Amino acid sequence: MHIFQQYINGTFSDGTTQFESLDPATAAPWAKMAEAQVADVNDAVEAAHDAFFAPEWADMTATARGKLLFRLADLIAENAPRLAEIETRDTGKIIRETSAQIAYVAEYFRYFAGLADKIEGAHLPIDKPDMEVWLRREPVGVVAAVVPWNSQLFLSAVKIGPALAAGCTMVLKASEEAPAPMLEFAKIFDQAGFPKGVFNVITGGPAAGVALTSHSKVDHVAFTGGPDTARHIVRNSAENLASTSLELGGKSPFIVFDDADIESAVNAQVSGIFAATGQSCVAGSRLLVQASIKDEFLSRLKAKAEAVVIGAPDDMATEVGPLCTLRQREHALELIAKSVEAGAVLITGGEAMDREGFYFTPTILDCSEAHDAASLSNEFFGPVLSVVSFEDEAEAVRLANDTEFGLASGVFTQNLTRAHRMIRKIRAGIVWVNTYRAVSPIAPFGGHGLSGHGREGGLQAALDYTKIKTVWLRTSDDPIPDPFVMR
Ligand code: NAD
């Protein structure tokens, strides 16, 4: 059994209690994790609070913070294969994906490292002759980060990078479902040379999450997870009136017009829904396909879905691995059963696989005659695609926006003017045209509606971890005149 420790104030410890984490490919426990109790949460927040005001961090130049982040990026790149192996083991995310993603995580840290000394304030052309007024962008303070289990290193990097670049300190609570990658990351972070307490990692379930996000010394809560949990998080943070950034779920439309390059669209849809075993917030989980090409498109898609290589996550040949938890699999079975009852037609898949681990077959459900099917409005977080056909552009827009979520969207068409109309009309944080699932540290990422608010990636991500201080400086040497005249 592997042992993973929590990281508080620069010190690793087992904590007073531990819990076991399951290997999703075998459903057997493989590692023991320290489980943060309320006292651990308090220690971690106090450490981050003290570090925020300590001169080692508070007086460090932004350039020096950037250099530390560059060092961290190098360490992540050097340790990427080990981090990938651990993330694969704990979450079931296939090694092909974790290897590529963690190599890219180093690039995210490099981007934010470079940004550290480019977070600028402003000078105001104020309407008073004897005043200089300028804005300082200052770090928001202690950040509580709460993350889910999928792509955890990646989802954490887009919080840690901008927060530390801006000069904040942080307590990150890893997901109780698969905390190993973040606890391993803490070991790497420890070597980068940051002052003690600037970054702390704990784990544990909702109790630790509540203690952290309602702590009176937390200034900002950065959360990625489901909308139901987000409502709790916002209530918790209200205790302290902390600001929040929320990256939540999605039910993203993948829209294919009859003039699209069909081969490209089919391939993009396959990776859009089956990559990460569908456990992706930006999964293109609603295929909206023009009625005139529906049969051809679905038959090509079905053939590709049935040819997907399902296997052990640590095998480089595997394209779809197990779901992370048994709960995910039960949720998928339940939603499919409800949808079929409502008139959806199962084109392929829909089954828990008869092998050890939490495997689930890639699934396509045609909901063209069942617009009320639960599968069209609920996030599966699994490899399940729901299909609806449309007649024209207006119907495509209406169906695309018929969701409470608004994270991502994809449009496949060769018609340039139509592409521009669709970009304007779709209500989502991301529109991919003739591509899907592309991400970059340079591009903001985030949603509308139940998909949350705030942006991760790009300059905006760093600004979300700052607040503005307005400075007024009187330049006149004359005595201040009548104190009761407003100036
Ligand atoms: P979840 O909402 O169940 O849990 C996320 C985290 O919140 C976990 O660390 C959990 O311990 C913690 N938590 C639970 N209850 C809490 C409470 N009351 N107070 C404080 N913390 C609490 O999410 P999950 O099932 O682990 O992950 C799947 C969800 O995450 C999906 O909805 C998915 O779309 C979303 N997600 C979004 C993005 C994005 O960037 N938009 C990325 C990945 C995942």
Image (spheres, rainbow, N blue to C red):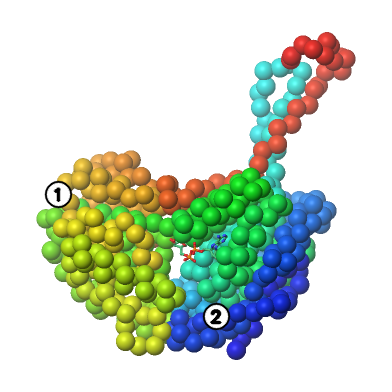
* Residue 207, quarter of the rendered image: bottom right
| On-image quarter of the C terminus | top right
Viewer-nearest residue: 390 or 335? 335
Quarter holding the N terminus?
A: bottom right
Mark 2 falls on what kind of element?
A: strand
Label drawn at residue 460: none
> What residue is shown with label 1?
391
Kindly tell me whether residue 462 is visible in this rendering: no
Q: Where does residue 414 sit, x and y in percent of width and height?
A: 23, 51
Identify which residue is drawn at 43% across, 52% down: 451
Q: Earlier in the sequence, mark 2 or mark 1?
A: 2
Question: In which quarter of the view is residue 223 placed?
Answer: bottom right
**Residue drawn 23% across the image and 48% down it:** 396
Figure check: 359 above or below 234: below
- In the picture, measured across the screen, residue 37 lies left or right of residue 105, that is right
Q: Is residue 368 visible?
A: yes
Judge from the rendering whether residue 36 lies leftward or rightward of residue 274; answer left or right: right
Q: Disc 2 versus disc 1: distance between alpha carbons?
A: 48 Å
Q: In the rendered view, does 196 fall on the left or right side of 137?
A: right
Disc 2 target residue: 21
Q: Residue at x 29, y 48 (%)?
A: 402
Judge the density around disc 1: few (<14), some (14-19), many (≥20) Cα neighbours within 10 Å.
few
* Label 2: few (<14), some (14–19) or many (≥20) C-alpha neighbours in 10 Å: many
| Position above or below: 353 against 334 | below
Nearer the observer, disc 2 or disc 1? 2
Figure check: 269 above or below 235: below
In percent of width and height, residue 265 lies at: 25, 61
Residue plotted at (72% across, 68% down): 40
